[in-house]
Amino acid sequence: MKSAVAWVFIVLGLMICHASADTRTIRVFVALADNASQGIAKVPAKIGNGDDAELNLYWGNSEGFKGVFGRSKSWKLEKAEADPVPEIVDRRTYKHVSQDCRIIAEAWRGKNIRECLEAFFSALHSSENSLVAFIGHNGLMDGAIPISGLSAAPQPPDAVILCCISGRYFQPHLEAAKSRPVLTTTQLMYPGSFLLRDALEVWLRQGSRAEMRMAAARAYASNQKISVKAAAGVFTRLE
């Protein structure tokens, strides 16, 4: 009897481990907009303070990551950590309501955008996540960051990069990591997190990169009050 009970617990343990292994994890690195330290078009001071995540354009604002995913019916907040390390103002974990997937998102201080990008590039070289995303100002426009010397991961994550002209600037880093870009940009643009939200719904159902591009295009067209055709030109044709 004891051996039978022990066997049941072993099987349950294996099932739990397997379920955990099957959970997809998305890491999102958000560099807060910062009028003082970034080469950005100046925005109103209250949304351009790189130390204030709550009001920041790319985080607490209604179109920032926290604003968008906090209102989402598809993602539910599991955990919030204020100031987990000096460079990060806020870290939040969300669980999808119908898919076995979690998002771990971090709001990096605007003045630490270089460190944020370096962390993003390191994540590209890891198999810990299924997808990694960067949102914010294209810090590579302000200065190059050396290609990581790390080896490519056995299973590199997919990559979403929402900043101006990311396809061209980030391509060498993606190639070094052998990471598959699923959404990048071709033009100067506004990286609202509604783009990530809509693109992820396609990615979660294993839709194509062309479908992800058009999901982002429709969201961008609605936000910017332009045609879907014009909005589609903002995003790289990866299909």
Image (spheres, grey):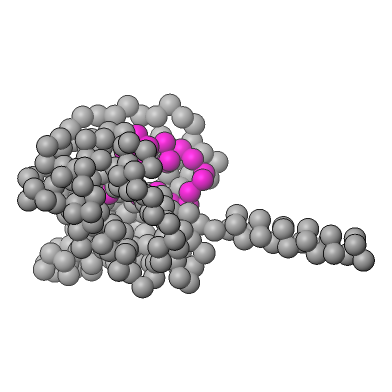
Q: Which residue is drawn at 11% across and 68% down?
A: 225
Q: Which residue is drawn at 21% across and 35% down?
A: 111
**Residue 94's quadrant in the figure?**
bottom left
Quadrant housing the N terminus: bottom right
Farthest front residue? 82
In the displayed structure image, the side of residue 107 where residue 156 appears, left or right: right
Is residue 119 a member of the stretch shown in magenta? yes
- 145 or 172, nearer to the observer: 145
Q: Which residue is drawn at 44% across and 66% down?
A: 96
Question: Is there any visible trace of residue 38 in the rendered image?
Answer: yes
- 148 or 110, nearer to the observer: 110
Compared with 111, 97 (above or below) is below
Compared with 74, 78 (above or below) is above
In the displayed structure image, the side of residue 105 where residue 62 appears, left or right: left
Is residue 36 a member of the stretch shown in magenta? no
Q: Which residue is drawn at 27% across and 63% down?
A: 68
Quadrant housing the C terminus: bottom left
Question: Is there any visible trace of residue 171 in the rendered image?
Answer: no
Which residues lie in the magenta part? 116-135
